[in-house]
Amino acid sequence: MKAVFISYNQALTDRVNAILDEQGIRGFTRWALTEGRGSVDGEPHYGTHAWPSMNTSVLAIVADAQVAPLLEALRAMDAATKMQGSRAFVWNVEQTM
């Protein structure tokens, strides 16, 4: 199993929900308001007067076979919304209960 952490502009929440549904990923944890800035470019998302945008983050534990199609769908979303600065990271899950 893998843990997939997705961080994106909160304006993309409906698109991310649709991707999770299309990929058959039902279970996840969402943090509605997260702050951050990209490591390469893009504007910070701090929720301040100067940088009013905010991010949302999702953590989903998925089967290994679900990772590649999920990342492909997220890459397509990011390509279509490049200025929003979506990112996804994958970690191994050692155990669950």
Image (spheres, grey):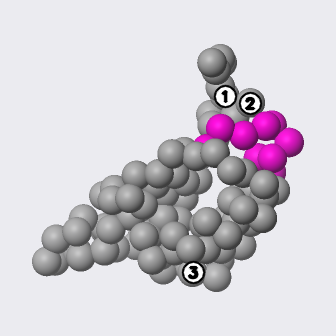
Instruction: Specify the quadrant that holds the N terminus.
Output: top right
Residue on which the image places disc 1: 92
- Is residue 36 positioned above or below 16 on the image? above
Residue on which the image places disc 3: 81
Q: Amino acid at mark 1?
A: Asn
Disc 2 and disc 1: Cα gap in Å? 6 Å
Q: Secondary structure at mark 3?
A: loop
How many marks do you count on the picture?
3
Check residue 66 for magenta coloring: yes
In this picture, which residue range is highlighted in magenta? 60-68
Give the residue at x 80% y 37%.
64
Q: Secondary structure at mark 1?
A: strand
Which of the 4 image quadrants contains residue 22?
bottom right
Relative image position of residue 63 (x, y in whole percent): 79, 37
Q: Amino acid at mark 2?
A: Met
Q: Residues within 10 Å of mark 1 (few under 14, many from 20)?
A: few
Q: Is residue 79 visible?
A: yes
Residue on which the image places disc 2: 1
Q: Is residue 5 visible?
A: no
Please tell me which residue lies in front, 24 or 79: 24
Q: Marks 2 and 1: CB-CB under 8 Å?
A: yes
Mark positioned earlier in the residue sequence (3 or 1): 3
